[in-house]
Image: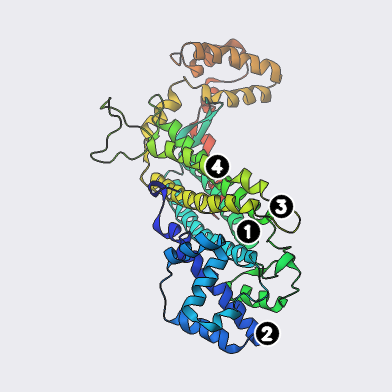
Amino acid sequence: MIPRYSRPAMTKIWEPENRFRIWFEIEAHATDALADLGVVPKSAAEALWAWWATNPAIDVAAIDAIEAVTKHDVIAFLTWVAEQVGDEARFMHQGMTSSDVLDTCLAVQLTQATDLLLADMDALLATIKTRAMEHKFTPTIGRSHGIHAEPVTFGLKLAQAYAEFARGRERLVAARAEIATCAISGAVGTFANIDPKVEAHVAAKLGLSVEPVSTQVIPRDRHAMFFAILGVIASSIERLAIEIRHLQRTEVLEAEEYFSPGQKGSSAMPHKRNPILTENLTGLARMVRSAVTPAMENVALWHERDISHSSVERYIGPDATITLDFALSRLTGVVEKLLVYPVRMQKNLDRMGGLVHSQRVLLALTQAGISREDSYAIVQRNAMKVWESDGALSLLELLKADADVAAKMSAAEIEDRFNLDYHFKHVDTIFDRVFG
């Protein structure tokens, strides 16, 4: 992560102090449960919580200094806590292994991060909905292969984005449930030296579910699914960002990013207004997706445990969530301030001489008794004249003058097939499906 693409609330989740506080809570809750089971004295748990109640500062530097000697982060943390609490701290970590702390902590951090991402998505969805309603019936050209196809509305473009991000949110909720698991099962996951009731107690206190079978680590298929869903959401961000980038091209210019007073587009060319935010979002999406393959590769660990996944997750946990948090917020701002140009949209709709209505004429001719193949040929021969004239000719006028068309359709019937509003008769139905 780098500060340029980070927001404080998400960054704080991954700071050492938060990690160590979660570690302490795991250890202290486990000690509570062990005391209830009579494995350790109640005074041990009371001593831990009494020290914690003083709201102590976590001395990250001191813990790091101990780790420099022990070469083991959990032992370094336990040693530092023992120095603060005193003799009663010896009862911490009874029957536990390092993965019990590390994996359960990662589950807490990922759920904390997911809660922020869900709030980000709620904000984005609300913004997209507002703009979709604003442009529900704003006509624009639909494109397939980048080529003019048939009319749509700009509101429909945004409704599609809304539906996609709504699906992404549902997946993220499911990912949160799947990743929010606790493992306090001891070495190789057999509970030989710790009662499963301890795991259940810690899970309940931390808002997690218990891992049914954890070997010595929580199975990494859960994490692979989590990061895969982050990657899908990032791809949805890129899809909308690319749409905006295309619409901002000079030859199109149907919409563009807000250009603030004093903003500069180019160090060389004063006229430039570049889509820098959406280009940035394309790049950020690539970075989020870059976490997916390593997460998949982490699934295949040796036997009951190895730590080949550990270094990977120290990167991708913070980087993917921090980057996605920033990207969702940035996209929300882009959509909220997006400059939309309906006049230009209409101009682009009209620039190819009515070619966008060709299908309606084709269907009308088939209904009038001409075979589909012949109907296609009649419309296409006229359409190609318009295409080759770069829109200077009118498809409507050419069709009126075509003897084969005139034999089957009156001028009024042909003109009726060029009614733009015809294409929008089911917009309300689509919006009802999307927004309810």
Q: CA distance from mark 2 to mark 4?
A: 50 Å
Measure how far apart labels 4 and 1 are at the Cα level.
18 Å
Q: Tell me if 249 is positioned left or right of 396 in this view.
A: left
Quarter-of-image position of residue 370: top right
N-term-proximal mark, 1 vs 2:
2
Alpha carbon distance from label 1 to label 2: 37 Å
Q: Residue at x 47, y 38 (%)?
A: 283
Q: Nearer the viewer, residue 19 or 177?
A: 19
Is disc 1 placed on a helix, strand or loop?
helix
Number of the front mark, 4 or 3: 3
Q: Earlier in the sequence, mark 2 or mark 4?
A: 2
For the residue carrying disc 2, how many other residues have a C-alpha within 10 Å: few (<14), some (14-19), or many (20+)?
some
Residue 261 higher or lower than 129, as above or below = above
The amino acid sitting under disc 2 is Val
What kind of residue is marked 4? Ser
Image depth: mark 1 or mark 3 in front? 3
Q: Which residue is mark 1?
A: 174
Q: Residue at x 41, y 51 (%)?
A: 6
Q: Is residue 43 left or right of residue 253?
A: right
The answer to whether any part of residue 425 appears in the image is: yes
